Amino acid sequence: MSVDPGNSSAHSGNATVLVVDDDHDMAAALSDMLRQAGYHPLSAHSGHEAIALVEKESPDVLISDLRMAGMSGHGLQAELKRIAPDLPVIIITAFGSIQTAVESMKLGAFDYITKPFSNSELLLLVARALENRELRNEVKRLRVELARNHGLENIIASSPSMTAMLSKLAQVADSNASVLITGESGTGKDLLARALHFQSPRRNGPFVPVNCAAIPESLIESELFGHARGAFTDAKQNKVGLFVAASHGTLFLDEIGEMLPSVQAKLLRVIEDKRVRPLGATGETTVDVRVIAATNADLEKGVADGRFRSDLFYRIATVTMAVPPLRDRPEDIPLLIKHFLTRASAEAGKVPPQLDAETTDLLTHYRWPGNIRELQNAIQQAVILCTGATITRADLPTRITGDRHEPTHLEQLASRRMALEVVEREYARAVLASVNGHRGEAAAILGVDRKTLTRKLEEPS
């Protein structure tokens, strides 16, 4: 067998490929081809020998003949699903048929190729299998990183109220119960929703956040439930709704108190029936979604006022969690300051600065109406403006320090939207007055001659 010149070792990355074939000559030929292409080949002549090599060598790809004495290629696939479920398998056979192809794919084969085949065809399949394996590994790595970045351990808190709430969150995470998170804007409701998801058995599924207040009224149903082509004027193609996109994961409905009553009714039906019908469609799709909702509004008052459906409220509030405002948990402020200082300094490429005593006092005694979000923004501004090793009062927003900015004369003129010629005339008159009306001296200060000064001082006709 000759190697296709378009396939070089640059594409192989020295990956290990296990060839399984009871035909010794075929196994040797395939191994030679793989070696010439830059791979590290291993060979086995039975399914049992292949299993032993998989457990010992952990190959990156496995190529197996389908028809073999003893354990068949399908039998080997079934065993590999148990001991190495992520190992991509390519099945080779001279007895290709739709039935065997389907069976191979059902058992998890990456792909299927029939004899006779060219070297380039098989090498292309191997390269694609390796790319697919790398992508799957990257997805796993990112999921682990997401879980680590959004886990409970990343929520900065030491106050009794937050400690109790995080303990409750840990208890609720393993269930499928709907959770309603309440609290003022900026308290971190979205972080708690993500922590719930990544602590739950659904952590490998999608987390889909939806800001119900940010989606136009005319689009909210289409966004949540999807639509069929032609459902309305601009529906040029089918659209998958966010409920379906969140299947096997979590749908986070932020600011649910802003949802229209008509949409509330449809949302309730989807949550109860676990089925979605896109706008304009006749069929329904089953969805497996956990719903977490959040609001800064008083939903119980909304129910009493008739603005929010009581049946939906009780459906989404199986478990409720109230996030206390930052002003009610001052013990958390120093921890949050340290955390945001470290993060903002890293983003700015600076060594984390210190806080002087006055700045520390201002930050710890401020009421923080914008809660954690406002604190984070204040620290970020301070890090950017700080020119030394210490953050001072001058680096903080004036709303925190209480310092009032006195506008300069030019700022006052700008606020009056004055034309430039008017500004020049006022300045010329001010300079003239400062030198007791001596036009020669005033002209020298302004850098113009007396004639030009006289012209600037004249009222417009």
Image (cartoon, rainbow, N blue to C red):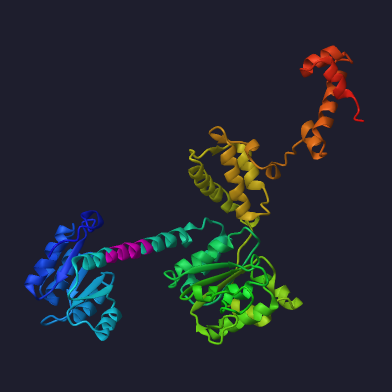
The residue depicted at 83 percent of the width and 23 percent of the height is: 428
Observer-nearest of 236 and 303: 236
Query: In the shown orientation, is residue 235 left or right of residue 436?
Result: left
Image quarter of residue 442? top right
The residue at the point 51 percent across, 58 percent down is 155
Q: Position of residue 347 (x, y in %)?
A: 50, 45
In which quadrant will I find the C terminus?
top right
Picture quadrant where residue 422 is located? top right
Residue at 18% in and 76% down: 115
Residue at the left extreme? 25
Residue 144 image point, x, y percent: 39, 62
Query: Whole-percent x and y of residue 335?
Result: 53, 50
Instruction: Report the label total.
Output: 0
Magenta segment: does it hold 8? no
Dominant SS of magenta comes to helix
Figure check: 32 above or below 416: below
The magenta-colored residue range is: 128-139
> Is residue 65 left or right of 307 when viewed as pictured?
left
Is 194 located above or below residue 335 in the figure? below
Residue 434 in sight here? no
Q: Nearer the viewer, residue 216 or 201?
A: 216
Q: Position of residue 401 (x, y in %)?
A: 69, 41
Residue at 89 percent across and 15 percent down: it is 436
In the rendered image, which quarter is residue 145 located in? bottom left
Q: Is residue 136 magenta?
A: yes
Pick whichever, 292 or 218, lies toward us: 218
Q: Relative to the observer, which residue lies in front, 370 or 252?
A: 252
Q: Tell me: 401 left or right of 144.
A: right
Instruction: Determine if residue 263 is in view.
Output: yes
Quadrant where the image shows the N terminus:
bottom left
